[in-house]
């Protein structure tokens, strides 16, 4: 029986930083900002903090197991539902939240 002094390598670059996730978050937040192009600080924060995650779930890697499901009908429904979710959030939820926060600030 042979005993190795070092554990076997997993083949993962442990010293390399993974920037794809952070870049995807920034892109989703930028897309949410582009939807309305708000200039007031409250509107910018609402757009980034509510619209960004909506884009992440709808168009990013969120719900990826449903979007790439082996049942084609479920995959299509998940894609349509994700796009509708982004539309509803950006069309009604973000403006309502912005106006509510501006009225009560």
Image (cartoon, rainbow, N blue to C red):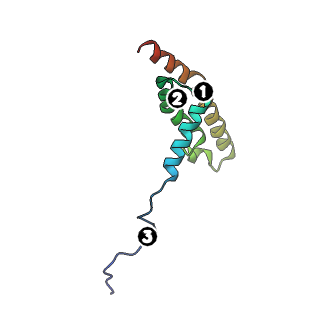
x and y percentages locating residue 10 in the rendered image: 43, 70
What residue is disc 2 on? 47
Query: Local crowd at mark 2 within 10 Å, few (<14), some, or many (≥20)?
Result: many
Apparent side of residue 79 relative to residue 12 in the rendered image (left or right): right
22 and 85: which is toward the camera: 22
Quick check: marks 2 and 1 in contact, CB under 8 Å?
yes
Q: Quadrant of the N terminus?
A: bottom left
Residue situated furthest bottom in the rendering = 1
Element under label 2? helix
Q: Nearer the viewer, mark 1 or mark 3?
A: 1
> Relative to 14, is 83 on the left or the right?
right
Which residue lies at the image location 50% right of the left edge and 49% below the top edge? 21
User: In the rendered view, would you say 12 is above or below 23?
Assistant: below
Q: Secondary structure at mark 3?
A: loop
Closer to us: 84 or 45: 45
Residue behind mark 1: 36
- Sequence-first disc among 2 and 3: 3
The spot of residue 85 in percent (x, y) is 59, 31
């Amino acid at each position: 029986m042979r005993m190795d002094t070092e554990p076997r390598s997993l083949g993962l670059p442990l010293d390399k930083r993974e920037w794809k996730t952070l870049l995807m978050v920034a892109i989703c937040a930028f897309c949410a900002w582009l939807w309305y192009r708000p200039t007031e600080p409250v509107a910018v924060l609402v757009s980034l903090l509510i619209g960004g995650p909506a884009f992440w779930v709808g168009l990013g890697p969120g719900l990826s197991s449903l979007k790439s499901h082996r049942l084609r009908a479920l995959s299509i429904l998940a894609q349509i539902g994700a796009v509708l979710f982004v539309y509803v959030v950006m069309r009604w939820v973000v403006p309502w939240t912005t106006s509510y926060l501006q009225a009560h600030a």
